[in-house]
Amino acid sequence: MKTSTSSPRVWTVAETPVAELEHVCFSYDGERVLDEVSLRIARGDFLGIIGPNGAGKTTLLRIVLGLLRPSCGHVRLFGTDVAQFRDWQRVAYIPQKAVAFEARFPASVFEVVMSGRVRLAGLGRRFAAPDYEAARRALETVGMLPFRDRLIGQLSSGQQQRVLIARALVSHPDLLVLDEPTVGVDADAQEQFYSLLHRLNREMGTTLVLVSHDIGVISQEVTQLACLNRTLVFHGSPEEAMRSGALAEMYRAQSWMVAHRH
């Protein structure tokens, strides 16, 4: 059983998973890029998805999020078929290359975060006090509250990434999906970023799904690892992945990872 320290929710192993994929396939222009992928994401997981270029990682995320329709198989979010799922405030997504604000982009940090409340407040409706408080708390969570009035384009890429995390958190999602979030972020900022993700996962109970090319780093950070190369080569703990030889099979070469658990 897992209990979130920031809310009264209690999660049990028997509870409906956050996401389920059953025998999912997808093709681009007749070429199969996902083939019979079945995957279960439990509440509280910190799942890392790795694989070579063209393995279908981003495609898989977009199918989970309902942005692409699989050519075969079924996808469910919180027990509901993704085609009928409507409770999208429970899901937040940060896509590849999301950090690309120019220096003179005309929006403050606080305004960017507030834009994440539009779906909850309703398009065209004025924000109310709870919306402003949610944005303030989200910025506080990611350590960016002192920068609330700064133009987003004046921040470093690592700081911008934190602001985008705050924008995602402002709707209090149960599932946070990130696609290559540390591309272009320096090593120090990456360390702070992963520390933030651990807090979201362990203290706030947010389920995380993270796509990355950095096998060594991700093996140290996540609790579950999915190795994808058109098919699902492996799904389990990082330690099990190393013992199973799944990485060598996926990359068709000998691979070694060192995972340190502190």
Image (tube, rainbow, N blue to C red):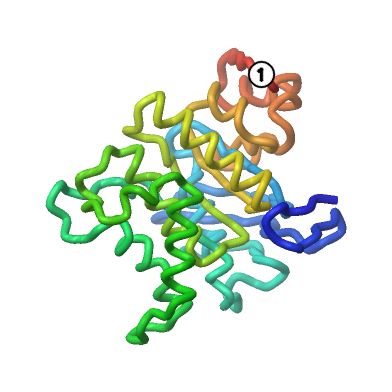
The answer to whether residue 40 is visible is no
What residue is pinned by disc 1? 260
Count how many numbered circles sit on residues in the image. Answer: 1
Q: Percent position (x, y) of residue 202?
A: 68, 44
Q: Residue furthest left?
A: 104
Residue 246 place in picture, x, y as percent: 67, 26
**49 relative to 261, above or below:** below
Relative side of 186 to 262, left or right: left
Residue at the outermost bottom position = 125
* Residue at 56% across, 64% down: 172
Q: Quadrant of the C terminus?
A: top right
Q: Is 212 left or right of 255, judged from the image as shown?
A: left
Depth check, front residue: 97 or 126: 126
Local crowd size for mark 1, using a 10 Å CA cut-off: few (<14), some (14–19), many (≥20)? few
Residue at horizontal 85%, vertical 51%? 1
Q: Is residue 168 visible?
A: yes
Q: Residue at horizontal 52%, vertical 56%?
A: 26
Q: Position of residue 68 (x, y in %)?
A: 47, 63
